């Protein structure tokens, strides 16, 4: 299905379940939200770049026009997934609003 990009809520659940090794990626934003995730082995940590923020800004404008606000951090995380062709793993249903405006966002919901 593609390389996973783990949202903060998934990282929290994995640590609660005692899982200390996860293959895939997360972002510096997720680690700032949940610093304990830095103890998980196997994760690549992505630092958002200009291209990610450019995509995020476009998403934010489209979400505003649609009247569907989404937290800024989640918009950037979605932009990273889109830009790098990753599959976002999350429990947050508001990513469905982003999928409605950008069909290239791939999400696996838990």
Image (cartoon, rainbow, N blue to C red):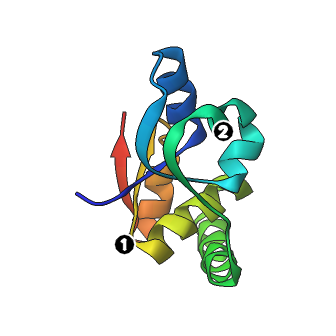
Extreme residue in the front direction:
41
Tell whether 23 sits left or right of 75.
left
Quadrant hosting residue 35: top right
Quadrant hosting residue 22: top left
How far across and how far down the image is residue 60, in percent? 66, 70
Look at 49% across and 56% down and name the residue there. Answer: 97
Q: Is residue 71 visible?
A: no
Q: Is residue 70 shown above or below 52?
A: above
Q: Name the mark on residue 38.
A: 2
Q: Which residue occupies the foreground of this view, 24 or 6?
A: 24
The C terminus lies in which quarter of the figure? top left
How far across and how far down the image is residue 90, in percent? 46, 41
Report, in whole angstroms, how far the alpha carbon at label 2 lies from the one at label 1. Answer: 28 Å
The N terminus lies in which quarter of the figure? bottom left
Secondary structure at badge 2 equals helix
Look at 34% across and 46% down and name the residue there. Answer: 108
Q: Residues within 10 Å of mark 2 (few under 14, many from 20)?
A: some
Look at 56% across and 69% down and name the residue there. Answer: 79
Q: Residues within 10 Å of mark 1 (few under 14, many from 20)?
A: some
Identify residue for label 1.
104
Q: Are marks 2 and 1 in contact (CB under 8 Å)?
A: no
Look at 53% across and 16% down and name the residue there. Answer: 16
How far across and how far down the image is residue 76, in percent? 64, 64
């Amino acid at each position: 299905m593609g390389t996973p990009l783990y949202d903060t809520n998934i990282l929290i659940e994995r640590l609660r379940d005692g899982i200390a090794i996860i293959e895939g990626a997360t972002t510096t934003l997720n680690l700032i939200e949940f610093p304990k995730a830095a103890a998980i082995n196997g994760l690549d940590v992505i630092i958002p770049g200009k291209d990610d923020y450019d995509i995020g800004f476009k998403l934010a404008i489209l979400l505003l026009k649609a009247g569907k606000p989404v937290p800024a951090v989640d918009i950037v995380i979605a932009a990273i997934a889109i830009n790098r062709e990753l599959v976002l793993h999350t429990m947050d249903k508001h990513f469905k609003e982003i999928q409605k405006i950008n069909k290239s966002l791939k999400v696996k919901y838990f």
